[in-house]
Amino acid sequence: MPLSKRIIPCLDVDKGRVVKGVHFTGIDDAGDPVELARRYCDEGADELVFLDITASTEGRNILRDMVRRVARTLNIPFTVGGGIRTLDDARLILCSGADKISVNTAAVTKPSLISTLAERFGQQCVVVAIDAKSQGVRSDYSRVSARSKPQSGYEVFTYGGRKPTGLDAVWWAKRVEELGAGEILLTSIDADGTKDGYNLELTRIVSKNSGLPVIASGGCGSSSDIVDVFRKGMADAALAASIFHYREHTIQEVKEFLRDQGIEVRIR
């Protein structure tokens, strides 16, 4: 039997409120993190992701009190990211109720952090977030190793999508796998907030070239988009925000639609 696909709502948090923008900009308020977390848990979410989206750019630590408050409402796996730069940062977040920690900017700045976190807390706890943007230059990425640098046409960005790194997204996905990551949270900056569908090409090439589970993020506007990212993008999980925050769809409705399309999901 195939593994069930996961549906994961995302709470992008800024100054204690859930927000949503387009292409990582134009931020609008979307609600209270605790209230939304409780609703998504009750609706049957498989996991929940909490991202403090300005912690890295502001050079501060994540909002631990808010993490604790959200964690108390959940009985599903809980991933937290934003401003985690050290082993101690990760330990504090895990002790605050998170099941997994997500690193992005700090992982690019100091790749050995991925190995350190995996050795200390276990590979299953370490999610590496990759924010990628199309640069339009492509070459053969069908056969890459973690030490080669193909040109997939997608560049990794850090600091909330503000800083280009020069790293190719496919190469970096292979590299984080080698370093000990347990999962990849892959966000298309181009698709983020557009509700025009996931970037299927980006998701597919990362999924094909990495042995890690891939959570697709950015662009979800309908249940059909989620079907596409599972079938055409080869994703293991689909992360979505706007369609759930603004009650355009419930998680239960999405899962029933997926089941009707022949996609294995967990329905309570």
Image (spheres, grey):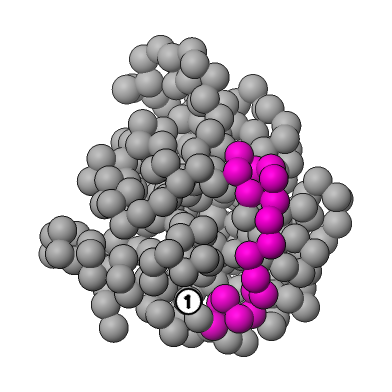
Tell me the quadrant of the picture where the N terminus can be found: bottom left
Image quarter of the C terminus = bottom left
Q: Which residue is depicted at the point 63% across and 65% down?
A: 30
Residue 52 can be seen in this image: yes
Query: Relative to 15, is 54 above or below?
Result: above
Residue 96: x and y in percent read 70, 78
Does 29 appear in magenta?
A: yes
Residue 127 inside the magenta-drawn segment: no
Vertical comparison of 209 with 14: above or below: above
Q: In this view, which residue lies farthest toward the right?
A: 59
Q: In which quarter of the image is residue 84?
A: bottom right
Q: Is residue 34 left or right of 88 when viewed as pictured? A: left
Eyeballing the image, is 203 above or below 165?
below
Q: Which amino acid does label 1 sit on?
A: Tyr
Residue at 36% x, 31% y: name it.
201
Count of residue discs = 1
Inspect this view and state whether residue 187 appears. Answer: no
Residue at 69% across, 83% down: 69
Instruction: Please report the residue visible at 39 percent of the width from the left and 55 percent of the height from the top.
Output: 238
Q: Position of residue 151 (x, y in %)?
A: 48, 17
Q: Where's residue 27, x and y in %?
A: 70, 51
Q: Nearer the viewer, residue 187 or 91?
A: 187
User: Pointer 1: residues within 10 angstroms few (<14), some, or many (20+)?
Assistant: many
Q: Mark 1 points at which residue?
A: 40
The picture places residue 23, in percent across and down from the top left corner, at 61, 39
Viewer-nearest residue: 90 or 52: 52
Q: Helix, strand or loop at disc 1?
A: helix
* Quadrant assignment, res 102: bottom right
Range of the magenta residues? 21-38
Q: In this view, does 4 lie to the left or right of 99?
A: left
